[in-house]
Image (cartoon, rainbow, N blue to C red):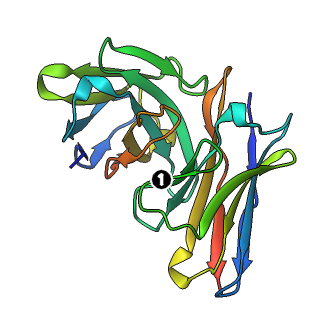
Amino acid sequence: QTVVTQEPSFSVSPGGTATLTCGLTSGSVSSSNYPGWYRQAPGQAPRPLIFNSNTRSFGVPDRFSGSILGTKSVLTITGAQADDEGDYYCVVYTRSDFWVFGGGTKLTVL
Amino acid sequence: EVQLVQSGPEVKKPGESLRISCEASGYTFSTYWITWVRQVPGKGLEWMGRIDPHDSDAAYSPSFQGHVSFSVDKSIDTAYLHLSSLKASDTAIYYCARHGVNIQFWPFWGQGTLVTVSS
């Protein structure tokens, strides 16, 4: 069974850079896993940020970028703002389990 | 404008069954897969499975196989999530989401349906 790992929490200063990661307990995340990232504000449905490793969804500012670095998918947020706070989820695709979400990272901007 | 509108909150007793609807508008319903996602209160997102409205072909997460099923009614552009033999652990928000042209992506989401299972 595929298990996707994310930092439970991450703090960044306003204007700073946040680097959230997404890995697998066994193996590496690669482009063949088509990693994606979603943000969820409290009480709201998730909203897409990144798909296919590095493609921004409609209307997502270029402060948000995705990449694969080493064995992990990475979401980088530059120029962090207060309204970037929320829960960030990565999702990967595998042939055995189809799509699997990570546990989510709670981003705090302070 | 693409919209997915889900049915309202439900309160059920253990052992009962439930159907949640997801009504699509603003696009050709049969063209894009619908995925279902569960979120237990205070917890993360879990992919349950997806259905192709064109031919009702469905794929389920191993974690949910046998406990849930999906269906569609193309005449009213609506997808359904069926839950049987409900347990308290099924208490969650259930979301439908539409796949994009790139199937590895869910650009559109329903508002979520809160299901509470309690005796």
From the viewer's perspective, tell me whether residue B34 is left or right of residue B23.
Answer: right
Q: Point out residue A2 in the picture as x, y percentages from the top left corner.
A: 74, 32
From the viewer's perspective, tell me whether residue A67 is left or right of residue B20.
Answer: right
From the viewer's perspective, tell me whether residue B85 is left or right of residue A30.
Answer: left
Q: Is residue B96 visible?
A: yes
Q: Quadrant of the C terminus of chain B?
A: top left
Q: Point out residue A39 in the picture as x, y percentages from the top left corner.
A: 52, 60
Q: Quick check: A75 above or below B82?
A: below
Give the number of marks: 1
Please report the residue visible at 21 percent of the width from the left and 49 percent of the height from the top.
Answer: B1
Q: In which quadrant of the rendered view does residue B83 lie?
A: top left
Circle 1 marks a residue in which chain?
A: A
Which amino acid type is shown beneath numbered disc 1? Ser
Classify 10 Å Cα crowding around label 1: few (below 14), some (14-19), many (20 and above).
some
Please report the residue visible at 38 percent of the width from the left and 27 percent of the height from the top.
Answer: B33
Disc 1 target residue: A57
Please report the residue visible at 34 percent of the width from the left and 38 percent of the height from the top.
Answer: B13
Residue placed most toward the observer, B87 or B99: B99
